[in-house]
Amino acid sequence: MSRFVYGVNPVLEALKAHPRDVVRVMLERGKEGRRSQGADRVAQAAAQAGVRVEDVPQGDLAHRARSGVHQGVGAELTEFQYAELEDILARHSGSALLLVLDGVTDPQNLGALIRSAHAFGAHGVVVPRDRAAGVTPAVSKAAAGALEHFPVARVTNLARSLEQLKEQGVWTVALAADGDKELREVDLTAPTALVLGSEGSGVRPLVRKTCDHVARIPMAGRVGSLNVAAAGAVALYEVARQRGVRT
């Protein structure tokens, strides 16, 4: 089963990261019959990678992208391969940084979190199989190409997976507005899994109870909390700061 990716950067990154998985590139011309500069860049990259390029009629990409901003560029790729959590841990056992998402349902938020996780040096994102967003074209677009370089693991039982992480020496830190300590007070230099909850109800009680720490991001303004994508970016930056990572 194939997947659809749209937008200049996501398609360019797919061609760069794994051209063998790109079945074809689809380009749409504007009203004057011309391609955009971005589409020309994609066409050139596809030619260099030996990937077939097709011109498609106006409206085709909008239909495939469900009216997302496609910039006249789309690509058909082989089915997305979720990573195995065990494999991610095996590669980064002594310094693991994972972003665990408990029921994030908005594709834009998931894509933004994947982009931030990749930018700040995390080693993978973990999502539950049910009642949460999976990898879709909208997620790929919001991730702006990061998804093509970054592992996403999907698990059946999030609380059980957190217990397994703890057994492997990974400290689990849930984020909540009523956390008992500030995030900067938690040692994030050890192997760490940051746990963020859904857009509406936050981290579920069972998942929260499973975590080693429940921490909050200090807020100076009158707004009580950040949305999950913004909170994830702030938390990941704090990890990078503590670890002295150059981002």
Image (cartoon, grey):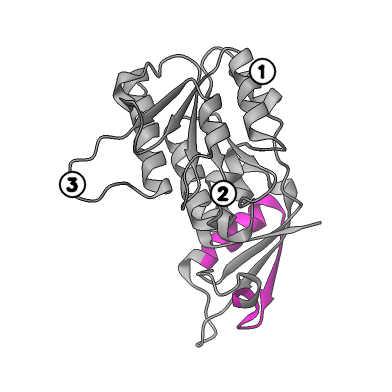
Instruction: Note whether 243 is above or below 175 in the view shown.
Output: above
SS type, badge 2 = helix
Q: Is residue 118 visible?
A: no
- Where residue 153 appears, as percent x and y from the top left, is 66, 36
* Residue 95 at least partly seen: yes
Q: Residue visible at 53% across and 20% down?
A: 96
Choose between 236 and 56: the one closer to the eye: 236
Asked where in the image residue 129 lies, by quadrant, the reply is top right
Task: Name the foreground residue: 117 vs 4.
Answer: 117
Foreground: 136 or 194? 194
Q: Which amino acid does label 3 sit on?
A: Gly
**Distance in Å between CA atoms under marks 1 and 3:** 41 Å
Q: Earlier in the sequence, mark 1 or mark 3?
A: 1
The residue to which callout 2 is attached is: 13
Q: Which amino acid does label 1 sit on?
A: Ala
Q: Where is residue 95 in the image (x, y as percent from the top left)?
A: 51, 16
Label of residue 221 in the image: 3
Q: Is mark 1 on a helix, strand or loop?
A: helix
Residue type for callout 2: Glu
Q: Earlier in the sequence, mark 1 or mark 2?
A: 2
Q: Name the residue under label 1.
A: 90
Instruction: Give the extent of the magenta segment.
Output: 39-62
Q: Do the residues labelled 1 and 3 touch (CB within 8 Å)?
A: no
Horizontal side of residue 160 vs 196, given as left or right: right
